[in-house]
Amino acid sequence: MREWIVVASKAEAKVFEKRAKNKNLKWVKTLENKKGRRREREFHTDKPGLSYAKYGSLAGPHLLEGKNSHAEVIATHFAHTIGSFIKQAYAEKRFDTATVFAGPKLLGKIKKQINGESKANYLNFVDKNIEKASATKIDKFLKKLS
């Protein structure tokens, strides 16, 4: 039985494989998101634009700001990349089960991208940010879950 362990952050997702016979984790692939390391202030080159209300008690200038920050949009796109990669790899029968480790915001985005399959038997989601953990520490986290 092949199990994939995906350790994701906004900047990268490391994919490891663990076979039932082999106790060690084997690196499979790293998905990178170069823009994921940037801070929100790095996306802005100047102040937001102004809008002037013509009527009512709120007449005067107002800043034009979007609903979502640039960092959130980039994290959503990367979550889509991770979800698509997992779905495609499962369709190609590259693994039998998968466990995804990520922080709460990113984990929610990944679940949303995988859609209805989040209730599938082959997926496990763990709300834990262990992006800097070594392979041996990741293996210890897996043993605690079992």
Image: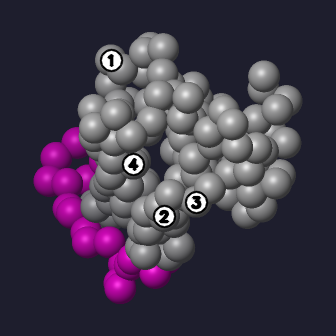
Of the two numbered discs 3 and 1 in the rendering, the one whose residue sits closer to the viewer: 3
Q: Which residue is mark 3?
A: 27
Q: Which residues are magenta?
A: 40-59
Judge whether 136 appears above or below 105 on screen. Answer: below
Disc 4: which residue: 82
Q: Position of residue 113 (x, y in %)?
A: 33, 35
x, y percentage for residue 24?
74, 50
Q: Label 2 belongs to which residue? A: 30
Magenta stretch contains residue 50: yes
Asked if marks 4 and 3 touch (Cβ < 8 Å), the reply is no
Residue projecting furthest to the left: 54
Where, quadrant-wise, is the C terminus in this rendering?
Answer: top right
Residue 143 placed where, x, y %?
Answer: 82, 32
Q: Quadrant of residue 1?
A: top right
- Mark 1 or mark 4, which is nearer the start of the sequence? 4
Q: CA distance from mark 4 to mark 2?
A: 10 Å
Q: Residue at 16% across / 46% down in the picture?
A: 55
Query: Would residue 18 appear left or right of 71 to someone viewing this image?
Result: right
31 lies above or below 80:
below
Between 106 and 39, which is closer to the camera in this rendering? 106
Residue 43 in the image: x percent, y percent?
A: 39, 77
Of callouts 4 and 3, the N-terminal one: 3
Q: Are marks 4 and 2 in contact (CB under 8 Å)?
A: no
Report the residue marked by disc 1. Answer: 116
